[in-house]
Image (cartoon, helix red, strand yellow):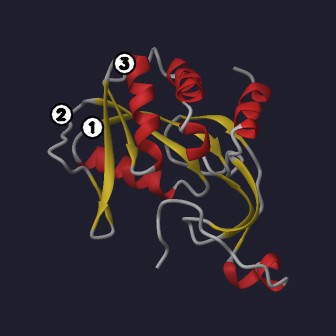
């Protein structure tokens, strides 16, 4: 798939939003990628995740893992494309962990996936979980990299769409200065 095909999918599903958004990272932005709008369509999910899987098909991936919520469907579909199992991490008492009796074997080759990264914080937490359990992270695959390639996760990272989106600290946000209310459209609450 080329960039135009990927953008077309995000556009026709209404996944690229404009407004004033409060991101999971705590930063504010005038653009938001609501990947759930894409992931509700199996035909698009399959196409996008197959493309991610293709980029890691020769890496010996044994397991694909992603953080709840955004990474669950991506993990499942990439794993299906690779013919391996899919796991997800979730927060327990504010800390990312592997629950539900999921486990990794020492040396197991793991691909970490996510729908969108801005700072890469959630993915970095998943990488730490994998490493703490003895797994070997072979790479990271994301649908959208909002950092424009600046999020350094310490492993090979592949993004289907890399974009530069302005983000602002809440204390220095021109959208707040204009009196526009910030909305949090994602799945994780900020406290």
Q: How many marks?
A: 3
Q: Residue at x 58, y 22 (%)?
A: 47
10 Å crowding of disc 1: few (<14), some (14-19), many (20+): many
Measuring from the top left, give residue 114's x and y in whole percent: 49, 43
Q: Which mark is residue 60?
A: 3
With 19 as the anchor, is 111 left or right in this view? left
Residue that numbered label 1 is attached to: 135
Query: Which residue does the image show at 67% across and 52% down from the upper left?
Result: 147
| Vertical arrangement, residue 152 with respect to residue 91, above or below | above
Q: Is residue 112 shown to the viewer in this render?
A: no
Q: Is residue 27 left or right of residue 155?
A: right
Q: Earlier in the sequence, mark 3 or mark 2?
A: 3
Left or right: residue 27 versus residue 71 is right
Residue 133 appears in the picture as rendered? yes
Question: Which residue position holds label 2?
Answer: 105
Q: Rounded to the nearest whole Å, what is the CA distance between mark 3 and mark 2?
A: 14 Å
Q: Residue at x 47, y 36 (%)?
A: 74
């Amino acid at each position: 798939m080329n960039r135009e095909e990927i953008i077309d999918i995000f556009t026709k599903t209404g996944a690229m939003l404009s407004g004033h958004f409060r991101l999971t990272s705590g930063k504010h932005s005038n653009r938001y990628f609501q990947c759930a709008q894409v992931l509700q369509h199996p035909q698009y999910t399959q196409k996008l995740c197959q493309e991610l899987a293709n980029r890691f098909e020769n890496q010996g991936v044994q397991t694909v893992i992603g953080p709840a919520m955004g990474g669950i469907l991506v993990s499942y579909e990439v794993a299906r494309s690779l013919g391996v199992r899919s796991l997800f991490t979730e927060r327990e008492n504010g800390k990312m962990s592997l629950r539900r009796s999921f486990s990794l074997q020492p040396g197991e080759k793991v691909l970490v996936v996510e729908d969108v990264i801005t700072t890469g914080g959630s993915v970095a937490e998943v990488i730490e979980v994998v490493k703490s359990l003895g797994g070997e992270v072979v790479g990271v695959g994301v649908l959208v990299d909002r950092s424009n390639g600046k999020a350094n996760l310490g492993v090979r990272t592949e993004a289907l769409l890399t974009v530069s989106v302005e983000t602002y600290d809440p204390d220095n946000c021109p959208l707040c200065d204009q009196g526009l209310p910030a909305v949090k459209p994602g799945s994780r609450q900020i406290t």
